[in-house]
Amino acid sequence: MNSPIHPLAISTAGSLSRAADPRLPDGELSWGPAVLMDESRPGHVRCGLCPYRCDLPEGRVGSCHVRRNSAGIGQTATRNIAVKHLDGVERKPFYHFRPGVKALTIASPGCTFRCSYCINHRLSQYGRDEDVPWRGRPANLDALVEEAAKEQAVLCLSYSEPGLAPELTMALSERARPRGVPLLWKTNGFLTPQAVELVAPSLAAVNIDLKAANEDVHRRLTGAPLAPVLEAIRSFYYAGVWVEVSTPVAPGVDDLASLRTIARHLAQIGQIPWHLIRMSPAYRQTEVPPTPVEVLARAVRIGYDEGLHYVYVERALGDEGRSTRCPECATTVIDRDVWSARRVSLREGRCLDCSSPIPGRWT
C-alpha cells in the first residue's frame, strides 16, 4: 500500500511547508503510443502489460481505464502526471536504498487493482469511481530529471500504479541515468513476465505490495489474482533490481498463518526487507479499526522466525520498528525517524562493529 498523498511536503530546505501542495493543475486528458500492445488482429488491440491481457475493440479502454484502442493503435494516458512531491525515500518506503536521500515522487492516474481500503483512491481509481475526475498534465521529462538532479534525489513513481506507465518509466530512465538519478517504483507487481523484462533495466529498486498469501483473500482485497505478484517479486529480484516488499496487516483478514506464509516465501528468495503496514480506516473501509499494535509485534517476530533479518513497522512500534540491526552482532546500523534516516553506521555496506555485510544499495 502506498503512503497517502498529503498536503504537507518537504521543501527544498528540508522543512515542512503547507504551501507545497503535491497536486498539479489539471489539464486535458491526452493519449500517446503504448508499448506491449498487439495490433495484429484487425479491429482489435490486445494489451500485454498486465495479466488481464485485455482484448480491446475499437474505441474501448482496458480495465485500468488508461490504455485503449484508438483506430487499431494501442495508446496510453500515463505519460501524464497528477502529483509531484519531494520527501524522504524512507516514506515510500525504501529502507535499504540510499538512506536519507530525497525522493521526487510523481504519479499518473490509474491502477490495475480495486482495493477497498486504498488511501489514494481519488487518483488510483480514475475511470471506475464517478467522483474521481481526470487529473494530470503531460510530464515534462527533462524538467523532472533536472529537479531531481538538483535536489540530489531519486525519482520515484508511486501513489497510483506505476506498472501502468512503462512508457513514462523508460523515457525518464533514458534521461535520468546519465545524470546519476536512479528510478524507483512503489508497485503492486501485477505485471506480465514480458512487462517485467521490459522495465527492469530502467529501474534501480522496487517496493512491491504483497497484500495476501491466499488466492481467495487476495482477490477479495484487490479484485486480482495473486500468482503474478509472487512471480514479479522473484523476477525483479533475479533481474538485479533491488526489491523490498510491503504487506498491509488487515484486522480480520490477515491471520498469523498467512503472514508466516508470506515471510517464508520471501526468505526463500533472499534477504528481502519486509515492511508491515498498519491498516487504517479509508475509502470503503472506514469502519475498520486500525491494526492492533500487538498483532504487528507478533507479525515482526514471525518474519524473524521464518529467516528474514529485516522486518519493519513504520510508526506503531516506535524507533525500534524502524531500525536496521546487524544480524550478526545486533548493533543498530541505521536509526530512523518517521521521515528519514537519522544515523547510518555503515562503511561500504558493512556493519561498523563487526564488518558483516548488510544487503542493500547504499550509494
Image (cartoon, helix red, strand yellow):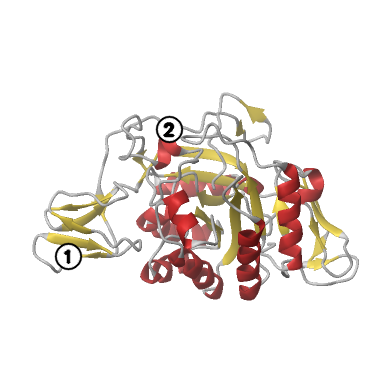
Task: Determine the residue located farthest toward the left in the rendered image.
Answer: 42
Residue at x 63% of width, y 59% of height: 259
Q: Is residue 96 above or below residue 286?
A: below
Q: Are marks 1 and 2 in contact (CB under 8 Å)?
A: no
Residue 332 is situated, as x and y percent measured from the top left of the image, at 85, 57
Residue 65 in the figure: left or right of residue 182:
left
Q: Is residue 128 above or below residue 308?
A: above
Q: Earlier in the sequence, mark 1 or mark 2?
A: 2
Quarter residue 199 falls in: bottom left
Residue at x 40% of width, y 71% of height: 193
| Disc sitting over residue 39 in the figure | 1
Q: Which residue is mark 2?
A: 24
Give the amino acid type for the residue marked by disc 2 in the picture.
Leu
CA distance for labels 1 and 2: 34 Å
Query: How many other residues sit within 10 Å of disc 1, few (<14), some (14-19) or many (≥20)?
Result: some
Residue 238 is situated, as x and y percent measured from the top left of the image, at 54, 75
